[in-house]
Image (cartoon, helix red, strand yellow):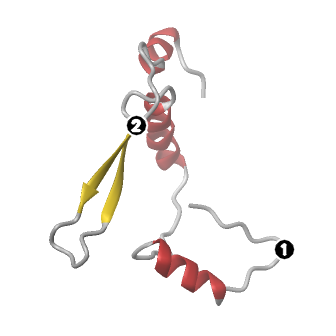
Amino acid sequence: MIINKKQARFLTQNKPRAPNLKAQIKLHEQRTPIRPVVNNTNAPAHKLAKFLTKTLKAYITLPHQYKTLNSTTLAHELKHFKLNKNHRLVT
């Protein structure tokens, strides 16, 4: 796929900035855990990443065979998951 000049201008971030990290307190849960929230909209590669995601989804369909609730559950499940040499873990 070739990107033309108009698309290249659109996909280039004019004023790139480092992503902002904010903390969102989960008041509805006990011990009020904090959820990190990252705003990537002004990151240098944000527009390009969105474009590539949309483009690749049109050509590649991947089955969502494995889903997890959170990182703790994922870590626990991966302890019991057997991988061969030719397997790759992708997130």
Rendered view: 52 above or below 4: below
Quadrant housing the C terminus: bottom right
Q: Residue at x 26, y 55 (%)?
A: 24
Residue at the spot of label 2: 40
Work out whether residue 66 can be spotted: no
Q: In the image, residue 5 lies at what x, y percent?
A: 51, 9
Residue 9 placed where, x, y %?
46, 12
Q: Which numbered disc covers residue 9? A: none
Q: Quadrant of residue 25?
A: bottom left
Residue at the left extreme? 28
Asked which secondary structure carries label 1, the reply is: loop
Using the rendered image of the protein, determine whether residue 74 is visible from the camera's viewpoint. yes
Mark 2: secondary structure: loop
Residue neighbourhood size for the residue with mark 2, other residues' Cα within 10 Å, grouped as few (<14), some (14–19), many (≥20): some
Q: Nearer the viewer, residue 79 or 8?
A: 79
Which residue position is annotated with label 1?
85
Please, is residue 2 above or below residue 59 in the view? above
Q: Residue at x 25, y 76 (%)?
A: 31
Above or below for 34 versus 60: below
Q: Examine the rendered structure and indicate whether residue 89 appears above or below residue 78.
A: above
* Left or right: where 27 falls relative to 73: left
Alpha-carbon distance for marks 1 and 2? 34 Å
Q: Name which residue lies at 39% across and 27% down.
A: 42
Task: Report the front residue among 65 and 23.
Answer: 23
